Each structure stands twice: as C-alpha cells, then as structure tokens.
Image: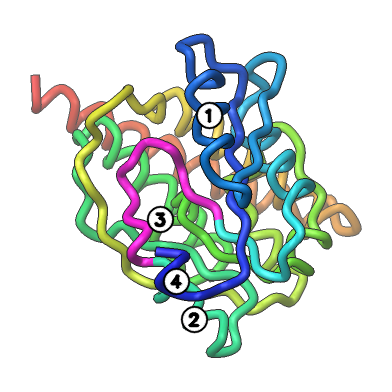
C-alpha cells in the first residue's frame, strides 16, 4: 500500500513484551525492509506505553496507528490521509459493521455512547486503533496509564479538529480480545479521571454534579449489559 501511494514513509512495529515468539518474527521482517523499525519492550506495559514508544520513535509529520490483530485493512489508509488533507488534525476509524461477539460489541457501544454523550464529540468509535494524527497533536498530549482510549477527547479539548471515517472491519483470526465488562468499568473510571484533569481541575465543585449523573448512567448501562448477557444465556 505504501509503495502504491509513493509516500516517504517508515513502519514502526512495537512488541509489547510478548512471549510467543513475536519478537523473533519481527526481527525477520526488520531485516527485509530498511523502512521497518522494531521496538521490543522488556515486558508487557500496556497499549498506552506501546503507543508512546512508537510515537517517540516516529519521525514523520503524519503518524498512523494500527493494531496488530489483522482486523483493520491497510487499504483504508488513503481515506484517513484524505481527511487530514481536508483540514482535520486527528482522524479516527469507525468500525460501523463489526465482526466481534456481543460480549465485546455491547461494552464498546456503552463506552462510546457514554463518552460521546458527556463530551459532545461526534465520534462513534473512540477506541478504534486505526487513527491518523498530525504530529503536533501527539506532541501536545501527556499520556499515561491506559489513557490511549481518550486521545481524541484530550485533543478535542485542546482545540484540535477531530473527525472520523468509516473503515472496514475483518473477523479476528488470531488471538482474543480482552475488552469486556471489566475493561468497560475501568475505561469509564479513566474517563472520569480525564474529565477531572482536563475540565474540572479549576472547578472541582462542578464535577460532583457531573459525577453523580455519570455514575447513574454507568449503573443503568451496566444493568442493561448484564440483562443482555442473561437473555443470551
């Protein structure tokens, strides 16, 4: 795809401490193409740390991220770059037709609905790993923990222009996703942390009204999720 687009490019592969021989395979790939850089973390630090390592290694003015589960299609890359050329600073993929089980799609929809409702950001898939950024967006953000989910939120609140394009989503062949009810709850709690640090640090009392409403919504959405699981057996 990159050869067809005739762009000056580099490919950065980040191995987040895997123990299944991934690092050896990546070294073989590295030896086959001078554009490829391999970063192997000493242990599993999580997705945010892996992304940060890749961001720091990247040298281009445009950075594109993609998960390694082969569910994203590199052929969609021109769409994301065209959206940046149209004036956006960050473009997120939207997996509108997903090939995932309900145990993953239901928590994801709850998470996306909640974040969209409380931020007003018109994205449908905040956690989609297929994104394109202008470099200045990444340089302006401070990430830690598992805040990679909220890069669009933090960028939007800093005044950057955010948008999305619909992308194809392929069935997962290898591995298993870890996103579920537990990750949903943690993600929503991280969202409250982001809101406090970016919106309410100077107005802490205002947070309590929002917090109460958010917890009420979280309880209702959690009940709905458990009800769906019970109906499914």
Mark 4 falls on what kind of element?
strand
Across and down, in percent, residue 8 comes to: 62, 70
Label 2 residue SS: helix
Residue 82: % across, % down: 47, 82
| Applied colour scheme | rainbow
Q: Is residue 154 left or right of residue 75?
A: right
Q: Which residue is depicted at the point 32% across and 55% down?
A: 73
Farthest residue in the right direction?
202
Q: Earlier in the sequence, mark 4 or mark 2?
A: 2
Task: Kindly report the distance in space between the C-alpha atoms of the residues bearing marks 4 and 2.
Answer: 8 Å
Q: CA distance from mark 3 to mark 2?
A: 23 Å
Q: Nearer the viewer, mark 3 or mark 4?
A: 4
Residue 48 picture quarter: top right
Report the disc number at residue 164: 4
In three-dimensional space, the C-alpha distance between marks 3 and 4, rounded to whole angstroms, equals 15 Å
Q: Nearer the viewer, mark 3 or mark 2?
A: 2
Could you tell whether 179 is left or right of 190 in the image?
A: left
Residue matched to label 1: 26
Q: Which residues are the magenta region?
A: 65-76
Q: Is residue 72 magenta?
A: yes
Marks 4/2 in contact by CB < 8 Å: the verdict is: no
User: Residue under circle 2?
Assistant: 83
- Who comes first in sequence, dot 3 or dot 1? 1
Q: Secondary structure at mark 1?
A: helix
Which image quarter holds the N terminus? bottom left
Reading the image, the residue beneath label 3 is 113
| Cα distance in 3D space between marks 2 and 1 | 31 Å
Q: Where 225 falls versus 168 (above or below)?
A: above
């Amino acid at each position: 795809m990159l050869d067809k687009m005739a762009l000056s490019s580099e490919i950065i592969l980040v191995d987040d401490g895997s123990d299944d021989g991934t690092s050896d395979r990546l070294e073989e790939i590295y030896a086959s193409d001078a554009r490829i850089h391999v970063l192997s973390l000493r242990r599993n630090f999580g997705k945010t740390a892996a992304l940060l390592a890749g961001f720091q290694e990247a040298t281009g003015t445009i950075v594109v991220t993609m998960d390694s589960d082969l569910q994203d299609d590199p052929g969609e890359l021109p769409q994301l770059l065209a959206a940046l050329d149209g004036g956006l600073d960050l473009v997120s993929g939207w997996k509108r037709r997903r090939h995932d089980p309900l145990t993953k799609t239901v928590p994801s929809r709850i998470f996306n609905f909640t974040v969209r409702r409380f931020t007003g950001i018109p994205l449908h898939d905040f956690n989609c790993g297929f994104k394109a950024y202008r470099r200045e967006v990444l340089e302006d953000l401070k990430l830690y923990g598992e805040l990679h989910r909220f890069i669009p939120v933090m960028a939007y609140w800093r005044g950057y222009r955010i948008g999305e394009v619909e992308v194809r989503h392929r069935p997962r062949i290898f591995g298993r996703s870890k996103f579920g009810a537990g990750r949903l709850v943690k993600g929503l709690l991280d969202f409250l942390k982001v809101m406090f640090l970016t919106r309410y640090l100077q107005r802490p009392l205002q947070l309590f009204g929002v917090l109460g409403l958010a917890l009420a919504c979280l309880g209702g959405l959690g009940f709905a999720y458990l009800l769906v699981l019970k109906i499914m057996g």
